[in-house]
Image (cartoon, rainbow, N blue to C red):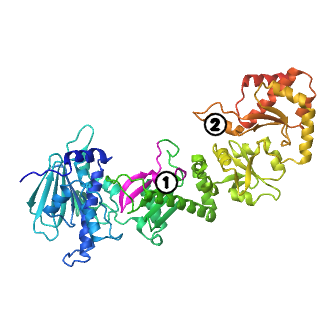
Amino acid sequence: MAKKQFKAESKRLLDLMVNSIYTHKEIFLRELISNASDAIDKLYFRSLTDDSVNMKRDDFFIRILADKDTRTLTVSDNGCGMTPEELEANLGTIAKSGTRAFKAANELGDDIDIIGQFGVGFYSAFMVSSDVKVLSRAFGAEKGAVWESTGEDGYTIRECDKESVGTDVVLTLKADTDDENYSRFLDEYTIRELVKKYSDYIRFPIKMLVEKSRKKDGSDEYETYFEDDTLNSMIPLWRRNKSDITAEEYNGFYKDKFYDFEDPLLVIHTKAEGAVSYNALLFVPQRPPYDFYSKEFKRGLQLYSNGVMIMDKCEELLPDCFGFVRGLVDSADLSLNISREMLQHDRQLKVIASNIKKKIKAELEKLLADDREKYEKFFKAFGLPIKYGMYAGYGVDKDFLKDLVLFYSAKQSKLITLKEYVDAMEENQTDIYYACGDTIEKSLRLPQTELVRDKGYDILCMTDDVDEFVIKLLEGYEGKPFKSVAGSDLDIASEDEKKAVAEKQESSKAILDKLKDALDGKVKEVRLSSRLKTSPVCLTSDGVITVEMEKVLNAMPMENGARAERVLEINPSHPVFETISALDDDEKIKLYAKLLYNQALLIEGLPIDDPVEFSNNICLLMTK
């Protein structure tokens, strides 16, 4: 029996496939099971038109046998099998795919699922094996044949007696090393786990003889026995009609599949047919996972091709703004690379990702319209990534996501959408007003809100760090610009109010200049305010960077020195200003300036430059 050499520079190519193409050694079992499924598909397809194939669909199966004594793992099927010539053609030439040729020759449509495309999956067995035997008997043949190789110096083919039609792939596992425990692939637990992970939805049963125990009849003693277990569930939930699936089935599938103890907040089950066909089953959890806001969290959907898992986290299918969604996509139209672990970055993937993005948004909008309480629960859990999604990429998705965000309404005392704010605006109102603060309560207690609320206008409370940055990018909603209650462009005082403040500003120029000088460059200007009603002082800003944005930017690790053009505004009607205006003691004016400025800083939640000096100044004022 002469040893034959692999074609296509076998040694070099085989080394590349074993050591480079596949990321995880465990992938070999998925590939062998997929090949077995393909072989069964071929014979089943033939049985539809050939009466000599006296087999029904229920007669087909895949079997796994682990023998720890001989360190062998066998994957068997009762599919079409191979002749000696087919063994040499398919296994002697690396990257030759019999499956691809079969599908092309028979012009198979989508009703027949054939997984293999590239003909290299079989060779993944050499990642874990020191020797591989393939015993196969083709349907209609009287004899079988054995193909055998160590993967290093060619292969042999010889005749053998094989009772049944089909193929047995027998792997002799490598010896364990310090870096790799190959023996684990003989453990029942590992085999079950890998079948469940990668091949749970192969549509033929994957059987394994397992050891079990039971009580002996009429005795408390136990005995062991062996019984066939089917390791895979076969029928993917996502391929069933939605009308036939109960909420309990969806919830159970989600909790088992994604290891959550709570039912999902929202289930999205969708199917697309056309240029790109796929099934998707998506879930929105009740709350973020523990590592959601950490660097370790990896977004993405599980990706299947005809029921075989290709990737556990396909990031390309899910945008950052919807990174909290968990689920899977199953498609036969994806262009896989030869390892079936990764995708080519092509049109099909982009189309699926775009459709899923739109579908998630549509379902969230539907939830917002149909179940407000549930949507608000969702938004409290996942509103932040949606806001960051609006800001990311220079606001490329701001318009796509703007109708999903909620803000707290000061007037309505609840979360509302931007549309709801605009619909409820006062007749003479032209702008959307907002206030920024660490909490809703702090936002509403800001002195800058006094005039806006006095006019009867609503105020949106912005309490997340990203809020004001999003608002600046969005600029407005339905033609209504956003305005900060602390912005220099507030401009809602009446003409009489403006005139009165302007006259007072002119007559008080000397004292205001002294206050500004006393603050030694800490503020751009000290001016009288038309927005304050009861409070003596507040801090506002001119320019692009607001006081709140300054706080956020300076809290970032890579940012420091960001500074708003601060303006100290004083209430001209407050007794404090009347007292300051009557002073002729420059030292006392300086003392009052520092106290008012520090008071404004405290109101804004900003740190005081010198707390000791502030404390001493209060004591000094109390003793005079």
Q: Secondary structure at mark 1?
A: loop
Residue 584 visible in the displayed image? yes
Looking at the image, residue 498 lies above or below residue 424: above
Which one is in front, 549 or 241? Answer: 549
Please state if 20 lies on the left or on the right of 617 as rendered.
left
Which one is in front, 92 or 129? Answer: 92
Residue shown at 92%/25% (left/top)? Answer: 583
Whole-percent x, y for residue 144 in the image: 12, 63
In the image, the segment drawn in magenta is: 296-321
* Residue at the disc numbered 1: 318
- Label number found at residue 553: 2
Indicate which disc, 1 or 2, sits on the residue closer to the N terminus.
1
Q: Within 10 Å of the Cα at label 2, are there few (<14), some (14-19), or many (20+) other Cα atoms?
A: some
Going by the numbered disc 2, the residue's amino acid type is Leu
Question: Does the segment drawn in magenta span residue 314?
Answer: yes
Q: Quadrant of residue 373?
A: bottom right
Whole-percent x, y for residue 391 in the image: 60, 47
